């Protein structure tokens, strides 16, 4: 799933380890989220959104991802 | 000295005692290379587990790694894949043993096929019951 984690983390001048410490996960988890290999849990997404001062909807590009999912469903 | 992880400490004590047992056995019946390596390994594991169980930071780090959400997903996924692989391997082995047993008439192959078939059935039933349980509780 596409997220804005990398973009917002760079804006906030945080390293992957610093963000990981703030949201109680390992830096590997942050790396995987940024690589779109792992979808964060709702609570982790909320914690990250709180760190960046944004909403889960914005952080996880929910509108965009929903549209993409809808398109994939239509193609089935 | 405070023990922060009692389970880990108990494992450490168990390994240490096993090492001690092997050492006593070695003195009574003699040592060989295999026994010496095993004894040293048991002592090392036992001591390191006991030490780690009293180290607050190490216990904290281990608990964190255990509960970390991506690690939990990796653990679940890898266990599930391993189970699938084992189930498929068991099925292939059952078929193989029964065919070889049937062709050669060797009862040992039939027995091995039946033994693996029991293990395969257990895995099928455990999967079925787990699915029923999680359908109700998730």
Image: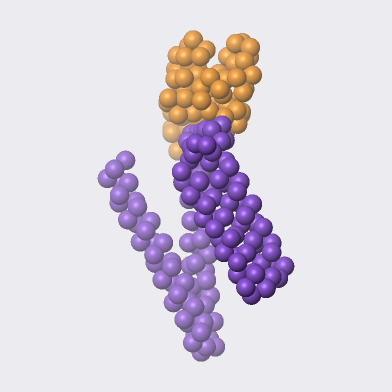
Q: Which residue reaches farthest bottom?
A: B105
Residue B96 pos. (x, y %): 53, 75
Does residue A51 appear anywhere in the picture? yes
Which color has been applied to chain B in this rendered view?
A: purple
Whether residue B47 is situated above or below residue A45 in the rendered picture: below
Rendered orange, the chain in question is: A
Q: Residue at x 64, y 69 (%)?
A: B26
Q: Residue at x 48, y 77 (%)?
A: B113
Left/right of residue B38 with respect to residue B132 in the rendered view:
right
Q: Quadrant of residue B17?
A: bottom right
Q: Residue at x 48, y 61 (%)?
A: B87
Q: How is the image coloured?
A: by chain
Does residue A71 appear anywhere in the picture? no
Q: Quadrant of residue A55?
A: top left
Q: Quadrant of residue B55?
A: top right
How many marks do you count on the picture? 0
Question: Which residue is nearer to you in this view: B15 or B128?
Answer: B15
Residue B19 pos. (x, y %): 59, 60
Q: Residue at x 62, y 55 (%)?
A: B43
Residue B33 pos. (x, y %): 72, 67
Left/right of residue B134 with respect to residue B43 in the rendered view:
left
Quadrant for the C terminus of chain B, please: top left
Whether residue A52 is situated above or below residue B34 in the rendered picture: above
């Amino acid at each position: 799933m596409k997220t804005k984690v990398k973009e917002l983390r760079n804006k906030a001048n945080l390293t992957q380890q610093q963000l990981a410490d703030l949201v109680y996960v390992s830096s590997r988890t942050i790396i995987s989220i940024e690589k779109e290999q792992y979808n964060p849990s709702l609570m982790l997404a909320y914690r990250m959104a709180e760190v960046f001062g944004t909403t889960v909807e914005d952080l996880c590009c929910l509108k965009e991802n929903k549209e993409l999912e809808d398109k994939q469903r239509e193609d089935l | 000295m405070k023990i922060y992880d009692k389970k880990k400490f108990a494992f450490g004590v168990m390994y240490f005692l096993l090492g001690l047992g092997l050492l006593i056995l070695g003195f009574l019946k003699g040592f060989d290379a295999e026994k010496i390596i095993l004894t040293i390994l048991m002592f090392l594991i036992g001591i390191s587990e006991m030490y780690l169980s009293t180290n607050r930071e190490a216990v904290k780090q281990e608990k964190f790694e255990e509960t970390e959400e991506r690690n939990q997903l990796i653990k679940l996924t890898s266990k599930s894949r391993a189970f699938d692989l084992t189930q498929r391997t068991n099925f292939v082995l059952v078929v193989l043993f029964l065919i070889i047993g049937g062709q050669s008439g060797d009862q040992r192959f039939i027995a091995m096929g039946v033994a693996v078939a029991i293990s395969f059935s257990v895995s099928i039933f455990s999967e079925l019951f787990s699915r029923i349980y999680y359908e109700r509780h998730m």
